[in-house]
Image (cartoon, grey):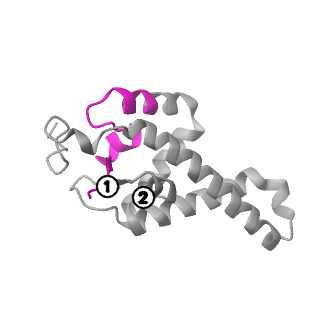
Amino acid sequence: MPNTHTHHPDPHYQPEFYADIPVKRLLAWVVDMIVVVILSLLVLPFTAFTGVFFFPFLLFTVGFAYRTVTLARGSATWGMWLMSMEIRDITGNRLDLQTAALHTLGYTVSLAMMPLQVVSIVLMLTTTYRQGLTDHVLGTVALNRRV
């Protein structure tokens, strides 16, 4: 398998790019979940409050759109931005719309299937590049933002 990390900072020579990434991802996730719940509550009146009956689906839909759009626009969700981190693609560039959507799809599937989420967390805690399962599949990495 070819080295997919040639365009990413080397964690052995530039460890500051990967410092505290698992903790920052967790904190960013909490912020993002709060944002998604608030956005979903704001959308609720536009469903004539019938969204109450399918609120989990509404959360899923709003969350998918929020995550895809924010990753495609700035390579970070608002939570990631707040934690001073971003996700870079296999070439080291910011995510485009397609990669952002695929990353969000992988994240969503991992959340829906607990064993995959556990694998993803273990990978983030143990791999050199701090990649989750979706990151491994797409060749993306979460990094501390360049100053």
Marks 2 and 1 sit apart, C-alpha to C-alpha, by 10 Å
Question: Label 1 sits on what residue type?
Answer: Arg
Q: Residue at x 16, y 36 (%)?
A: 1
Q: Residue furthest front?
A: 147
- Badge 2 crowding class, 10 Å Cα cut-off, few under 14, some 14 to 19, many 20 or more, is many
Numbered circles on residues, count: 2
Q: Amino acid at mark 2?
A: Ala
- Horizontal side of 106 relative to 86 (left or right) equals right
Q: Which residue is mark 1?
A: 145
Is the Cβ of the residue at disc 2 closer than 8 Å to that at disc 1? yes
The percent position of residue 32, horizontal first and vertical second, equals: 57, 53
Residue bounds of the magenta highlight: 120-147
Q: Which residue: 44% across, 33% down?
A: 120
Depicted 103 relative to depicted 73: above or below: above
Residue 117 is a magenta residue = no
- The quadrant holding residue 39 is bottom right
